[in-house]
Image (tube, rainbow, N blue to C red):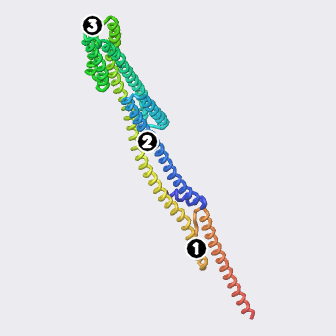
Amino acid sequence: MKRLLISFENVRVGKKLALGFGLVLLLSVAVAVCGIKNLNDISVRAEKISQLKAITDQFALARDARMQYVKTHDEKFIAANEESLKQVDGKIASLQTYPWRGEQLQMLQTLPGAMQGYREKRAETVSETRKRESIVGALVLTREEADVTRLAQSYTQDPATVGTANALNEISKHLTGVAVRVKLLELQNTEEAQQALVGFIAESIQLMDAIKPQLSAADVNALTEVERSVTGKQESAQAYLASYLAEEQATKELAKSGAVLTTASSSLFQEELKATHSDINQAILWMSLITVAAILLSMATAFIITRQITTPLSATLRVAQQIARGDLRADLHTSRRDELGELMQAVGEMNDDLRRIIGDIRSGVSQVSHASAEIAAGNNDLS
């Protein structure tokens, strides 16, 4: 340390000042760089948080749209669901451009797969919903009911066939009851409701078979055509519950894919939020430490440079004041090689030269006095 101070003493004053100001400037730059770096890190994390929040919000909108489709079977809600999923895709692609830690990157890489699985299962649920709508549409017996009603009316004219007319009207009521049980099946979606519907259709077919012996050949053919149509609808009714169960299973798988997406995005959101707070605290700590270090080093540098300038100036001033008072006994020497060292050496040499000149003058005066004395003595002798 002592050697370093001695070496620093020999540095020119201009360089000392430049080094001092340069050190202060360097520390200021360090504070600025630290602040900029941490602010940039915080900015990146804030953007990540914004994207993750957008994923959660858009997926919530997609989920709401799908639920509306389940309730209404309106295709516009599937379009809205897909639009929200596209927004989620864009956010995921944007997140993949940012730097992540290993485990975070693995979590992020699961999101595209979860989105693909969600879309596949959503397509299955939509397909099964459309299939059930088709089944329900096929179970409409309006035409068949009208045909049986017309047959019943043709037998009400003759009192002998009133019983046949009543039996046909009972069949018509059964066909009307099928529509009620279809509604119950849509509401309950249970095997019991499906069996009740199938059983009611079977009863209607049995009633038609039982009434045929009382009908004319032409009416038997007409009723047989109705029976054939109702039998086909009975097969459709049996496929309804299988479609519902398939949709329910697809919905469960869809929910799993959605859970993967929301869990991963929520976890990343919480981690980034926590990391942001940590970055803020770290930025405050580092900037405070560097600022304190800059202040201390600046004060130390100012003290050293001031001391190295004022100390030799004070010594030189004291010698100059002694010379001004006529005291040439001072001895000023230094090993410094800077401007102040040169000044001290110049003043010391001037003091030495003045002392030598005055000594020479004193010696000359003594010699002159001695010569004058000798001349005076010679004059006395001559007298």
Where disc 3 sits, the SS reads helix
Residue 286 appears in the rendering: yes
CA gap, disc 2 and disc 1: 72 Å
Q: Which residue has dot 3 on it?
A: 214
Give above or below for 229 relative to 29.
above
Q: Which residue has dot 1 on it?
A: 319
Q: In x, y percent, where is residue 229? A: 35, 12
Give above or below for 346 relative to 214.
below
* Amino acid at dot 3: Gln
Q: In x, y percent, where is residue 102? A: 42, 34
- Residue under the image location 59 percent in, 79 percent down: 325
Q: In x, y percent, where is residue 143? A: 37, 17
Within the image, what quadrant is residue 214 found in?
A: top left
CA gap, disc 3 and disc 1: 151 Å
Within the image, what quadrant is residue 340 found in?
A: bottom right
* Amino acid at dot 2: Ile
Q: Residues within 10 Å of mark 3 (few under 14, many from 20)?
A: some
Identify which residue, 51 or 106, lies in the foreground.
51
Q: Are marks 3 and 2 in contact (CB under 8 Å)?
A: no
Along the horizontal axis of the image, is 250 left or right of 343?
Answer: left
Within the image, what quadrant is residue 358 found in?
A: bottom right
Looking at the rendering, in which quadrant would you find the C terminus?
A: bottom right
Give above or below for 273 relative to 316.
above
- Looking at the image, which residue sits at the far right? 382
Q: Which residue has dot 2 on it?
A: 49
Residue 202 appears in the rendering: no
Along the horizontal axis of the image, is 253 left or right of 383?
Answer: left
Where disc 1 sits, the SS reads helix
CA gap, disc 3 and disc 2: 79 Å
